[in-house]
Amino acid sequence: MENEKAKKVKVFKTSSIQINEKDASHLVGSIVEKGISDSHNNPAPSLSFPKPTVLPFPVARHRSHGPHWRPLSSKGVDDNVDDSDNNVEDEEDKNLQEFERVATFAKPVQRRRKKGLDLRKWKEITQDDNSSLGKESEGDATSISQTTGKKNNVKESKSADKKTSPSDDDNVNSSMEVDVKPQLVSSVGGFTNSDTTMEIDTSNEADYQGKVKYTKSYDDKEANEFVPEWDQICIDVQRPRQAHLTSSMLSCSSSNNTRSEQKSGSLKSEIDAENRARIQQMSSEEIAEAQAEIMEKMHPALLKVLQKRGQEKLKQHLILKSELGTCSESVNGHVQSPQVEKHLHSEDGISHTVMTPPSKQKLDDEKFGTKTSTTASSSLWNAWSNRVEAVRELRFSLAGDVVDSEWGYHGHLKKKEHVTGRLIGEGHESRDNVTDRDYLRTEGDPGAAGYTIKEAVALTRSVIPGQRTLALHLLSSVLDKALHCICADRTGHVAKDENKVEKSVDWEAVWAFALGPEPELVLSLRMCLDDNHNSVVLACGKVVQCVLSCDANENYCDISDKIATCDMDICTAPIFRSRPDVNFGFLQGGLWKYSAKPSNILPFSEDSMDNETEGKHTIQDDVVVAGQDFIVGLVRMGILPRLRYLLETDPTTALEECIVSILIAIARHSPTCANAVMKCERLIKTIVNRFIAGNFEIQSSMIKSVRLLKVLARSDRKICLEFIKSGYFQAMTWNLYQNPSSIDHWLRLGKEKCKLMSALIVEQMRFWRVCIQYGYCVSYFSEMFPALCFWLNPPSFEKLVESNVLYESTSISRQAYLVLESLAGRLPNLFSKQCESTGDSEVWSWSYVGPMVDLAIKWIATRSDPEVSKFFEGQKERRLDFTFQDLSATHLLWVYAAVTHMLFRVLERVTWGDTVSPLENKGHMPWLPEFVPKIALELIKYWLLGFSASFGTKFGRDFEGESFMKELIYLRWKDDTEMSLASTCCLNGMVKIITTIDKLIQSAKIGTCSLPHQEQSLSEEGKVLEDGIVKGYLVELRYMLDVFVFSVSSGWHHIQSIESFGRGGPVPGAGIGWGAPGGGFWSTRVLLAQKNARFLLYLIEIFANACKDVPVTEETTFTMQRINAGLGICLTAGPRDKVVVEKTLDLLVHVSVLKHLDLCIQNFLLNRRGKTFSWQHNEEDYIHFSRMLSSHFRSRWLSVKVKSKAVDGSSSMGIKTSPVVGGCLETIYEDSDMSSMTSSCYNSLMIEWAHQKLPLPVHFYLSPISTILHRKTDSQKVDDVLLDPSNLLEVAKCGLFFVLGVEAMSNFQCTNILSPIQHVSLTWKLHSLSVNFLVGMEILEQDQSRDTFEALQDLYGELLDKARFNQSKEVVSDDKKHLEFLRFQSEIHESYSTFIEELVEQFSAISYGDVIFGRQVSLYLHRCVETSIRLAAWNTLSNARVLELLPPLEKCFSGAEGYLEPTEDNEEILEAYTKSWVSDALDRAAIRGSVAYTLVIHHLSSFIFGVCPTDKLLLRSRLARSLLRDYAGKQKHEGMLLNLIHHKKPPCVLGEQLNGVLSEKSWLECRLEILVEACEGNSSLLKVVEKLKAVVE
């Protein structure tokens, strides 16, 4: 019998089993792994396959469902089984007959614990004599065979390891069958342990649930220390009863020692959960008995130590929880504080706290290596790690839903509620629901539904194609749902081990875990692409498509392409910020860098490939790089040649579409990846050939093929030219030459064909537009005009609505006008002599403009069309409940936006800055083109008239005479983001047209004697045009300005909260795949905010010129609004808004603005001091300030880093970039539109996130006073303009004036909209003042800068006192940590103590007691400063012997109470005060009355003689003895000690310390008595006290 059972053992690393196709079809409920055999070097006997039940293959079954192996004697034996097979089965059936007696008691298989050997139910088998199963085991001496499933415990124990070889995974995760024979020998006290991990069959445990004792043995001392005291004591009490089990587990524990260390956090949590469950089962009598037993056995001192340690842990956990709550609001608004601690309340009132262990997930150290390791960021990072770690246990169905399959201790599923459609089918009912069950039951937990992400990834390597396909389908569903929920910003936060009842799924964490390094998804996907089964390859392509966020990114880019002013696409590569630099004052907002270096995309070139380099490139390197950037990892793994091969093998339509989508995502990643796609041999040629070879039937893959070539052409001008020369452009755009004969002919094609044709034509037009923007293919217009004219004419809207193809038709019309807009940008100036093409750039002819303008005017007039009016009637009737069925109006708005921008571009080319010859009429236009007044009259007639100048509410009910402009303003308030974008674009184009026409008419009036038809009677619109459109609608424009100021002020808050951990998103995906909530920087919400900012800037420019003759009060209000709005625009701008930021900065530092800031400074000084500065600024000073600040801001924040090496020898964008600092910026014409820079100087139409600094941090305006030349790095040149010492000093002086002005304005303004200045932490503001002192005191040498610096200190001092007062109201009396809101180390830099040391070094070397310098240094001794910085500042000052140089307390720029209250109770700081006392460092400070001496006297006196907590008594005695010993040896300290004894606290808190009013004599006696008690009977010290008493008396 023993030998027969030995044959059933599965052995690792044996030869691969051979299964034919017929046998494989009979495999039910088992998986055949690669490299695993069913025999040990012997051929396996044939087995009878289980007969499938009615449940479809391969449904997961519980043991109670079967399938059962049928005995040979039963009926229905398969006739195909021969006699030899029957003989073998007969022997097996005899062995299996023993189970028939207990089959009726079988229960569903319990889900195994993943964290090691589970022997919690050992007493049932070893000690329970009443168990029927136990009796059978003992009486019959029959071994119970238990087949273990997949070794989840072994695999999960290595879950913290980021790098695991595939072969190891196969070995660890393979199935293995072991016979376990319980040896009930008392001398051994346990089972005979084998080298193989085993699992005990406890299927009959339901009858003995009440008798089970939950215990846990462990030999890790560290784990014992982690368990709370009461729980650990309970385990200690039980240990005498389980000593025999411990001895049997020693071998297992020692063999898994390494794994136990790796999973210690999870093990601690598991042990704690079991201990708490044990305590909950105990009655109050049992708990009292256990406590009494503990009190008897343990020493009282040991109990106190344990209790103290528990209190400290509880306090630390509470502090961490409060920090998480604070940081989640201030640093990252979308990260919520998870439930990181849980309280267990026993019946005796004892509370225990169990800290959720930190995550063991290794989410790419380099990926997050740039974040500053501070308290706030560390707390946020730990919270995020716990969220990601919690995903490890989540199980998913094929539909991508989470199935909650937690098992209770007794083997039953916990009954839970259905949670918002996310958690499906818990309880016993879920196992019978075939549709919700997992089809892939052949691997994973046999008793649980669904699959974890790691299990699904592992199953993609199965040898059965069906399993691989279904596993990939599951991953695709999960990733698709996660991305959808992230974009919709519908994610919950579930911490690890947290109860998921009534919790939404944390899809952000799901996305991060799936793309993280642990599952190694990228490696599995790359292997599946090489599969020889088409279904697997297609399923794999779908997963890659989801991982790269192809559809979501294309949707964002599609909306971006609809905006005429967005000429640039943004690269989707993941990025992170560079570390803060001391030379720039540690200000955040450093250069963005690629998560994976571009050089890692192609590790070596083919030319340099030799034997040495070939051996260095490993798969593990690719996996590591993929953890930094998923696309880079795929490209390194050779995905491009594989995709080309698949295209060459004539793939299916679905696979071809998927492949092209992946190529588009790779091309959008970065210029280097786009270049890699171009350099992949035959790839582009294959795509073009497949497009040409296709029949006239339009397919979606053809549309995406055109889009791919468009994206590649955007990446580089040379690529675009190559496409044109090779004929690819003509081949891919031949549909543009075809035009329908009529609208009816086009509608007869059917909706589906119209939809495909519309999408194809739109992509082809976008491809053509890219070529036009480079200056190519302009001459193709004459050939394409006949077909283009069909779409430029307004259609019959009634027919389009009836056929439901309005969107398809308007999409083509919109794109056609965007093409015309680009063509208009190629027009020469109307009055310029140069009309011929220059170089390889072509120009458009003015002869085409007239007909195009007429067609555009027709679209403006369609607003009065009854069919068009119907689209807007819904908004008028239901203004507050606008439904999605009226979204068709959005399509028309996009057409109107394209039309207006096309007309504006034409009007813009009529006059282009200074290109008009100054010899003609002194720079004024000699004549006015006819289409200019024609456009104006039509626009006024159909879009402006009827606009009431007196409307003031957003939702007014009077709609009669309402103009289209008013409708557009209202449509912006709709919840639909795309409609808001389209409305804003329409308003933008409309306002640009009317302002440009006003300028042209005014210029023409001066240059000509009269306007055409002036003698005739003018119509209403003619009168408006005659008087000036802007002047006539100035009130409405002012209301529009207020609306957009409000929008921008709320928009920049959202953009500032996106960046987390110094990255655009926490995941190494592409674009939206960065994983930020709501899409992050890639959301339409951000796109709308940036569009609003662009339009607001244009409105501010209009009013800056129109408000020259207004009253001073109104001008002051507008200037304040202008400054706040300008700061908000700078904080909103993205990578392609560099021109926007430049124009905004020019507005902020304009001379008129600086004059207003000077007035604010004078008002502040008059209110605080009663007088202003003794000097005044003149006009030259303002001009100097403006020039220096403008130059600094441009160089500091808008400079682009020079790339040392690019793919083709130039920069990756092909643009001549400026150095990091001080380089020359591109010339931008003042009168040009910020989006019209489509001239041939551009070599790329793609902008990289990397190598630039936008969006700016909220404290960017502090940079003029925070930039120094402290340490020179290798990358900085001596002649850098930005770091030139003389230039820096001058910039700092100008910056002091600017910062003081905006601070004074923002803190004393009376507006409802808060300024961005008020959202900057006071920590940053105070730190910026300290930065300049690192390089000396030159900034204080001149009287003007010295007075300005002092005034700024006073202003910040007021803010500090106000913040302290507000904070003190919210502070709990016994928790003083909350008062320390000046967290320099937490907010500025982790090594801020080093900064303090260098600052004190300068203070001691050059200050000579300067009051202003001393006030700045003494700031770090303020009680609102965090403890670590106060301690570092004091120690540094004391060691340098410069405490006497600090100013007196009354000269500090903050109130005295801020330094003195609350009283100091930190042990280290009090000891530092005492050390300075006894080391004579305070002697001269006492003579000079320094603030340092005042602090020491006050805090030591309050601590020693005040009410002292019990745990601080030893410290009080120790400090008092040190002072007495010092006095005994140093008579000169007598005065200091007497001051200490006589020191009184302020009256407001005197009563609290003395518990009533005492006489002076009794008060001193009490204090002397405290000193006597501190002596602890020391005779020498008692003599000192007696001497002191005599002196006092």
Image (cartoon, helix red, strand yellow):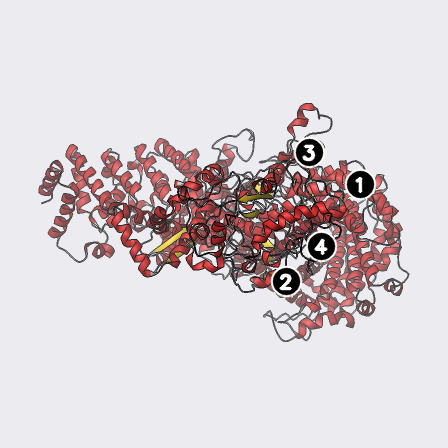
Residue 1337, quarter of the rendered image: top left
* Residue matched to label 1: 684
- The answer to whether residue 1413 is seen in the rendering is yes
Q: Nearer the viewer, mark 3 or mark 2?
A: 2
Distance CA(mark 1)–CA(mark 2): 48 Å
* Residue matched to label 4: 77
Q: Label 2: state its secondary structure.
A: loop
Distance CA(mark 3)–CA(mark 4): 61 Å
Distance CA(mark 3)–CA(mark 2): 49 Å
Distance CA(mark 1)–CA(mark 3): 19 Å
Q: In this picture, is 217 found above or below 1025?
A: above
* Residue matched to label 2: 433
Mark 3 / mark 4, whichever is N-terminal? 4
Which quadrant is home to the N terminus? top right
For mark 2, does the 10 Å Cα neighbourhood hold few (<14), some (14 to 19), or many (20 or more) residues? Answer: few
* Residue matched to label 3: 602
Q: Between residues 215 and 1333, which one lies in front from this camera angle?
A: 215
Name the kind of residue labelled 4 in the image: Val
